Image (spheres, rainbow, N blue to C red):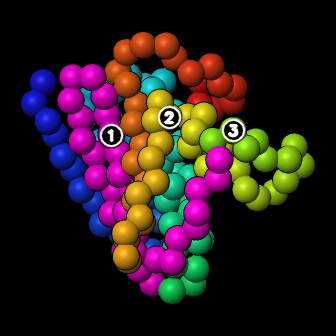
Amino acid sequence: MSPREELVLFHAAPDLALDALSWTESACARAGLDPRRTRQLAAGVLEAVNNSLEHGYGLLPGDITIALDADAARVTITVTDHGTGLPPSPADAAPAPLAERGRGSWIMQRACDEVRHEFDEDTQRVVLVKRRTGPQITTTGDMS
């Protein structure tokens, strides 16, 4: 399988998250990722985009880039913004059961096989990886 790259640029807006979710599901389908793994990866992308909107830009306009790279072993999606950012939470830091906030990093870690946060001077990237084969993540709700 040859590598495939797809890029989509969105202008940051409150309804962006649903557009990003729809794009992710379509791009993963075109890349041949199975539906269950697609839903799990899309859940991670949705959280990364929500974090970019809320913590990266707040109420200011800005672009978010979502890029998909696929090979025979995995599908990788990178969400990039140029906002102020939010430091990642530790992977094992489960949110309080009744917390209304603070679940994004935890959901990304649970939904994806690998999550990396990359920062440089004015760019934040969240790299989400889903393997095509191997153990499936056991989840409940819409991600299963």
Q: Residue at x 46, y 54 (%)?
A: 117
Q: Residue at x 55, y 34 (%)?
A: 111
Q: Which mark is residue 140?
A: none
Nearer the N terminus, badge 1 or badge 3? 1
Tell whether 69 sits left or right of 91. left
Q: Nearer the viewer, mark 1 or mark 3?
A: 3
Whole-Å distance between the Cαs marked 1 and 2? 10 Å
Report how many numbered discs are placed on residues in the image.
3
Q: Which mark is residue 76?
A: 1
Give the residues in magenta: 61-90
Amino acid marked by disc 2: Cys
- Which residue is disc 2 drawn over? 112
- For the N terminus, give its image quadrant: top left
- Quarter of the figure with residue 94: top right
Q: Which mark is residue 92?
A: 3
Q: Position of residue 93 (x, y in %)?
A: 73, 44
Nearer-the-camera pick, 17 or 67: 67
Amino acid marked by disc 3: Asp
Q: Is residue 26 visible?
A: no
Tell whether 66 sits left or right of 136. left
